[in-house]
Amino acid sequence: MRKLIVFDIDGTLRDEVLGIPESIPFVLRQLKRKGHEAAICTGRSLGTVQDDVLELGIENLITGGGSYISHKDVSVFETALDADAAAGVFQYLTDPCTDGVGGVLEGRDEIFMNQAAADILNQMNLEKSKKLTPRQREKFFKNEKIMYQDNIEEFLPGQVDIHKICLWCSPPVYRRIGEMFGAGRTELAQQGSWNEYGYYEIIPHGAGKGAAVVRLCEYLGIGIQDTLAFGDGRNDIEMLKICGTGIAMANGADELLASADSICGKPMEDGIYVELLKRGLIPRSSLRGI
C-alpha cells in the first residue's frame, strides 16, 4: 500500500544545531524505492528552508504552515492573507509610535521583520547556541538561512503575498491586529510566550498543516489513513491528529506528546529511522551507528 510520510523540519527531520542525521538520506531512498511518497511540512517559508534539507530532493513541500504546497516544483496550492489587512499590519509595525511590538511578514520566498522581532529572534538563537562549541555555533548560524535584521521597509504592500505573520506582543495588540483581517478569516498556527511577550503565528483560515496534508493526499491519490506524520512542535498537533499515524519526537512539546500515536527518539538518535524500521517501511541499514 502506497503511503505518504510527512516530516516537520526543525527538531524533527534535522537537529537545529547538528543538522541532518546520517540515516535520513537512507530513509528517503528506501521509501522511494518501495513506492512511498515523502513530504516536508514546515512553518518555514519556502525561501527559508535550509539548503541541506532541499538537497535531500524531497518532491513534496508544504511550507508557510500549510499556506503553500508544491509537488516536483509545481505549485499545487497557495493561499495568502488579505492584502489590505497585511498592508495595515505593515503600517502598524513601521509606525514610530509602535514600540516593542515584534513582527515578521512571511511571503513564499521572502520574509520581512522589524527591529523588535530581529532582537527577539537573535536573543532566541543566542540562548539555543550558548552551550555550543565555537565550531558548532558557526555551523548553527550558517545553516539557519534567515537574516535576523530589520528589513521590513523592503516590503512592498500589494506586491508580495503574505502567507504568515508572526507577532510578539500583548493580547490587546494581537486582538487589534486580528480585527484588521475580520472575523473568521485567519487562524493561529500556534501561540506561546517569550519573556514578557505573547507569541502568535497568524495564517489564512483553513491553511494549517493538517489541512495541507489532506490537500496533498488528494493531489497524490493517497488516503489520509495511509499517512504517517513526524513532528515536534505545537503547530504539528493538528497534523499528527489528522494523519493515519501521528508520531512525536521525544524532544517534542508536552501537548504534542499527549496527542501522538507513538513517540520516537530525537533526530540524532535516529528516531525516524528506528520508527520506520519498526513499522516495516524500510529495511535495516548498515550505516555506522545504526
Image (spheres, grey):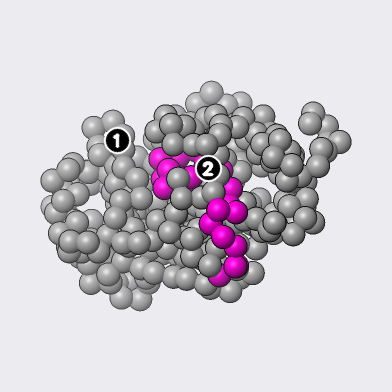
Magenta stretch encompasses residue 237? yes
Q: Earlier in the sequence, mark 2 or mark 1?
A: 1
Residue 240 in view in this figure: yes
Q: Nearer the viewer, residue 226 or 130?
A: 226
Q: Quadrant of residue 156?
A: bottom left
Q: Which residues are magenta?
A: 219-240
Residue drawn at (79%, 56%) of the image? 33
Image quarter in which the C terminus is found: top right
Disc 2 residue type (three-letter): Gly
Which marked residue is nearer to the observer: mark 2 or mark 1?
2
Residue drawn at (44%, 70%) of the image? 78
Q: Nearer the viewer, residue 283 or 127?
A: 283
Q: Nearer the viewer, residue 110 or 284?
A: 284
Disc 1 residue type (three-letter): Ser
The reply, left or right, for residue 34 in relation to residue 260 is right
Q: Which mark is residue 193?
A: 1
> According to the image, label 2 marks what residue?
246
Report x, y in % for residue 280: 74, 42
State the residue lying farthest toward the right: 286
Q: From what the image shows, is residue 185 above or below residue 260? A: below
Q: Label 2 vs label 1: CA separation?
A: 25 Å
Report x, y in % for residue 64: 44, 58
Q: From what the image shows, is residue 152 above or below residue 134? A: below
Magenta stretch encompasses residue 122? no
Residue 38 in view in this figure: no
Q: Nearer the viewer, residue 12 or 165?
A: 12
Residues marked 2 and 1 touching at CB (< 8 Å): no
